[in-house]
Amino acid sequence: MTLAPIRPELRGKSPYGAPQLDVPVRLNTNESPYPPGPELVADITASVTKAVLDLNRYPDRDAVELRTALAAYLSESTGVTRTFEQVWAANGSNEVLQQLMQAYAGPGRTVLGFEPTYSMHRTIAESTGSRYISGPRRPDFTLDPDAAVAVIREEQPDVVFLCTPNNPTGLSLDPETVLAVHDAFGGLLVLDEAYIEFSHEESLLSLLENRPRLVVSRTMSKAFGFAGARVGYLTADSRVIDALQLVRLPYHLSTVTQAIAGAALRHRKGLLQHVEDTKKERDRLIAEMRFLELTVVESDANFVLFQVPDAPGVWRRLLDAGVLIRDVGVAGHLRVTTGTPAENDQFLRALRELGGSSTARNDRAGLPSLEA
């Protein structure tokens, strides 16, 4: 029986995904290694118990209480005053980005990113029928503002993605570079700050003032350790929020999701202490890996990108040792998520057993690279 034809631009594509394997140490998807503590679990349980009493009713379709709490968190943590009218929330930052593409990109419009970067930027853009262009980076993965401005002026995209700290490299952008990109075109600039809480640098939220074409997206998956809850958000001019309400599905955030996200925000002080622990461990990983004579990219995120001569082979040998990290498709590089001190010790021990910088001596070359 003949199937209905899929859209031509989707033919031959592979779905986004990272391997989910049952191994002792999983350091491949940039999750927090710290589960919710007992006080948060109790609050979530109570909040869900209250919420389920009204599950016969639709949720607050505008999630005003949650957006108000997110605005308070942004104001408190950055010193930049935000109101709920300037904040939007959805099921993970990917849905937030998808809604932006539905409103500001789509057929006949162009989206620009600078790869390597978060691969879902391209995927979401293309899935909404947009034309996606990859801009240049320097060999060290930094962004050359002059080169970025040149490609923007040539292509005149409708949407530009900048990721800071960037995934998978961990590098941050300075405000001057962001402003140079912003001023080079007349479309929407999306600043993806999914990992900003782990950064040595401050958030660039202050750049939003008097810049209605600038959007800053965030997630609760990383710093809040809420990857399983699927809550993402953005902050922007209130007119951007109005545009997103035109494309969002009705009642897109469930009553339960809104309830548990609110509980996490009430316990943010304790949750963000884990961020400080992760930052210390990330810096330790970098120092230890450099001691092994590995070339490591500086990181402002909760992961580290490092260079190896045979990335697929080293990935396989680490997996054989019970440690799962990520081959992100950057030639000669692997990415490791920062785990608990014990998990990081196991990863470092496995690296040492491979011979540190001598990981080039690997007779298992030719193994296939995993999808970025």
Image: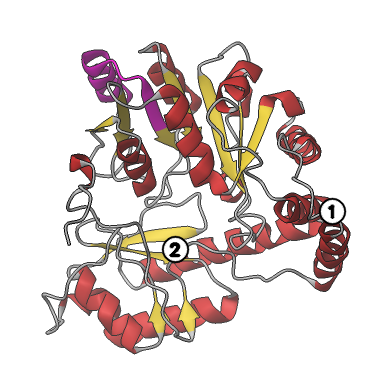
- The quadrant of the image that shows the N terminus is bottom left
Q: Nearer the viewer, residue 141 or 109?
A: 109
Q: Is residue 354 above or below residue 42?
A: below
Q: Is residue 154 magenta?
A: yes
- Residue where numbered disc 1 is placed: 54
Q: Residue at x 78, y 34 (%)?
A: 64
Identify the element where label 2 is drawn. helix
**Relative side of 231 to 152, left or right:** right
Residue 247, position as x, y percentages in the image = 52, 29
Q: Residue at x 62, y 19 (%)?
A: 237
Q: Residue at x 46, y 71 (%)?
A: 27
Residue 310 picture quarter? bottom left
Q: Is residue 199 visible in the rendered structure shown here?
A: no
- Residue where numbered disc 2 is placed: 286
Residue range (magenta): 145-161
Q: Is residue 358 magenta?
A: no
Q: Residue at x 45, y 64 (%)?
A: 29
Crowding at dot 1, Cα within 10 Å, few <14 / some 14-19 / many 20+, comes out as few
Q: Is residue 292 above or below residue 259?
A: below
- The quadrant of the image that shows the C terminus is bottom left
Mark 1 / mark 2, whichever is N-terminal: 1
Residue 228, position as x, y percentages in the image = 60, 63
Q: Main secondary structure of the magenta part?
A: helix
Inspect the image, locate mark 1, and give the three-letter code of the amino acid beneath it. Answer: Asp
Q: Nearer the viewer, residue 301 or 15?
A: 15
Tag of residue 151 = none
